[in-house]
Amino acid sequence: MGKQKYFKIIWTLFKKEFISYFNSPIAYIFIAVFLIAGNWLFFQNFFLYQQASMRNFFSLLPWIFLFLAPALTMRLWAEERKNGTAEFLFTLPLTDWQAVLAKFFGALAFVAVALLATITVPITVMSLGQADLGPVIGGYLGALFLAGSYLAIGLFTSAITKNQIVAFIIGLAVCFGFFIIGYEFIIMTAPAWLAPTLAFIGLGNHFENVARGVIDTKDIVYYLSFIFLFLWLNVRLIGRRS
């Protein structure tokens, strides 16, 4: 299979997955909950600090995505397996990687649309003061990488079971574990030799670095490697289908 044909199949499946979100209420519920929760939680304390800063907004996103990302991915494989459409999908001339990548990028593109819908937040903040553009750009970039990590986990857990609720709960638990594992209260209770590893593994630590506007290659490579790992696990899991 040539490269052009390989990526054309991914593009075709990606468009199908992305458009499918808007053919059901899930897209509009997701975006509505995301915008209402994010804006309300941020602006209720924004004027108390009297600073033109979006730091508190970006600090909320990991916790909002923690629930919304597994909710977005729980159906991607579980529903297909329950309805028997997964077997049909793999009778088509495509590879496991093509199917996984199409689902992942479809979900990531949808989250990017939801993030784009929050553009009114930085516009409002900048109209009220001189906000630093670096942390704003870094915050959105970090949010996209963090969302991608959550989605990769959610896609993997969705392939474990046919039950969407079980997929959601497992996805939520795994995302939460990887997010907090690098927090100081976890590291303080761990053996000294394990502390540096936990600090590096934690999704939260890398997000905070990028959200401050410090875009380090180390953090980018970490996120790309983390996403690849769970997509690879997903491919391995569906590759064991009977």
Image: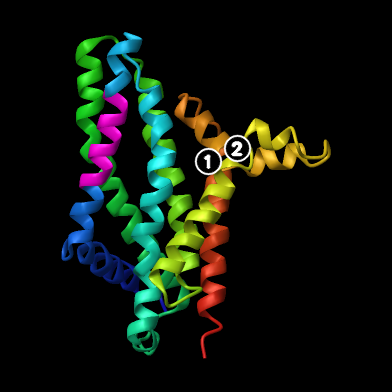
Q: Which residue is mark 1?
A: 220
Does residue 51 appear in this view? no
In-image side of 212 versus 36 (left or right): right
Which secondary structure class fits the magenta region best? Answer: helix
Picture residue at 74% right of the left edge, 32% below the top = 188
In-image side of 175 versus 79 (left or right): right
Question: Residue 218: which numbered mark, if any?
Answer: 2
Q: Residue 166 or 51: which is nearer the viewer?
A: 166
Q: Residue 134 or 195: which is nearer the viewer?
A: 195
Question: Residue 123: which numbered mark, if any?
Answer: none
Q: Residue 79 location, x and y as percent?
A: 35, 76
Picture residue at 60% right of the left edge, 37% below the top = 218
C-alpha separation, residue under disc 1 versus residue under disc 2: 6 Å
Q: Secondary structure at mark 2?
A: helix
Q: Residue 145 location, x and y as percent?
A: 45, 44
Classed neighbour count for the residue bearing mark 2: other residues with Cα under 10 Å, few (<14), some (14–19), many (≥20): few
Identify the image quadrant of residue 72: bottom left
- Position above or below: 94 against 167: below
Quarter of the N terminus within the rendering: bottom left
Amino acid type at image mark 2? Lys
Does residue 230 appear in this view? yes
The colouring scheme, among rainbow, by chain, secondary structure or one colour, is rainbow
Numbered-mark total? 2
In-image side of 194 versus 142 (left or right): right
Q: Residue 188 or 20: which is nearer the viewer?
A: 188
Residue range highlighted in magenta: 32-43
Classed neighbour count for the residue bearing mark 1: other residues with Cα under 10 Å, few (<14), some (14–19), many (≥20): some
Q: Are marks 1 and 2 in contact (CB under 8 Å)?
A: yes
Amino acid type at image mark 1? Ile
Q: Secondary structure at mark 1?
A: helix
- Position above or below: 205 against 16: above
